[in-house]
Image: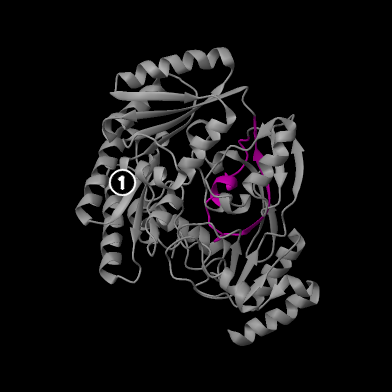
Amino acid sequence: MTTSVDQLFAELTDFLEQEQVTQNETVRDLHSKDESYHTPSLPDLVVFPRSTEEVSRIVKAAGNLNVPVIPFGVGSSLEGHVIPYDHGITIDFTEMNQILQVNPSDMLVTVQPGVTRSALNKELKKHGLFFSVDPGADATLGGMAATNASGTTSVKYGVMRDQVRDLEVVLADGTVIHTGNKAAKSSSGYHLNGLFVGSEGTLGCFTELTLRVFGIPEVTTAARATFTSITNAIEAVPAILQAGIPIARVELVDTESIRQVNAYSETDYAELPTLFLEFHGNEAGLAQDVAFTEEIVADFGCKEILFETETASRNRLWEARHNAAYAYTHGFPGKQMMLTDVCVPISKLAEAVVFAREELDRTGLEGGIVGHVGDGNFHVLLMIDHENVEELKIADEYNETIVRRALACGGTCTGEHGVGVGKQKYQRDEHGAAYDVMLKIKQVLDPENLLNPGKLIK
């Protein structure tokens, strides 16, 4: 491999600038890990392309020398997606960070993969538009498409896969293809957008994305509703959705997580199971929706619901929710977070969350539960000592317990974080014979298994 990497380095420097290719150990170390608990591993080279043509030539050169290729955004993934366990080269897309076109009439935007969510929304705001997918982290759009990211707003606007109209993709042999078009709908051909979104860099490298965007709502109102039990809080959610209320976010934060949020964000929220809510619409319509929501949650034992209409107050509310993970990290110095991620049918959500909480209490581990409960997705935040072998074993067994419970009730092992290496062992159980179809697709598009090998499927 060393000879191949040295040869590849020489070939890449023939057509790339010197600063675009590096073997610097510090840079390699930065690309050896993501934000997960998975063991780091150094790439042999890190490459910073600036165009689709360069990506194509990089992938082709690597393929000719049988060197693995790992696409990289900002490393905010949570299941080891970008860790190069087979070494090889990491392609860092941060220099491909241009917003290529904003088309307000078609409600579309075309970007390079290194554009971050916040950078895109800053530009879109000038046009009265916004990009809806909000995973919390300021991830790159290429990375968000690679993992089919979602987040707090997916209950109203959908997940990343719903926003992608077209991808420009460099395949394993260097061929460049487009997976869709700019039309609002199509019945032509296989649905390649759906195939490549969520493929985690195992089928190709994204070099351009055309995405759906939305008009900034006329009025936004946030709310915080406290309940006497987790079951009551969760069971209120389907009632809100069934009433046709245009809820844009509905997030569960359990009692322990509220306690950590209060300590970290210096808030004084009641330490009870809480729903964080947000409504988008027009002034007249939202007044009715807010009143109707108050009636609904009262039927489910809501102790108090407080509404926030001022931008600063709303931002503070959602900042507290988004910082829940950091609150735990800050609250348990010396420990590292293991973040679980399952999604179940909403009809099974209350019992799944209660089961997860009971099992967590039984383990004796520190942690709490938060979730995008409008679409059945929840996370357990576990704080563990990675030097403690027994604690790691308990945490792994706990994670498996809640995954198995999710699969048993018709859910999935991952609602939004993706598979990477952490959820790989559940793929056969979740997909059955369809897993063999996935393997065949991988073998056709990447016959030498050089694109992010060892991730998603084996």
Q: Residue at x 39, y 58 (%)?
A: 337
- Residue 231: image quadrant is top left
Q: Nearer the viewer, residue 20 or 64?
A: 20
Instruction: Provide residue 155's location: percent of width, then percent of height.
Output: 47, 33
The residue drawn where x is 62% and y is 49% is: 141
Q: In the rendered image of this protein, does residue 438 appear above or below residue 222?
A: below
In the image, what residue type sits under mark 1? Ala
State the quadrant of the N terminus: bottom right
Residue pointed to by mark 1: 406
Query: Magenta segment, which residues?
Result: 186-215
Q: Secondary structure at mark 1?
A: helix
Q: Decide which of 423, 234 is in the foreground and name it.
A: 234
Whether residue 153 can be seen here: no
Visual colour scheme: one colour
Specify whether residue 340 is painted magenta. Answer: no
Which is more toward the observer, 398 or 197? 398
Q: How many marks?
A: 1
User: What percent of the width, then of the height, locates residue 359?
Assistant: 22, 50
Among all residues in the image, which is located at the extreme bottom? 3
Quarter holding the C terminus is bottom left
> Is 47 on the left-hand or right-hand side of 283?
right
Q: Where residue 14 sits in the image (x, y, percent)?
A: 79, 77
- Identify the residue shown where x is 36% and y is 61%: 425
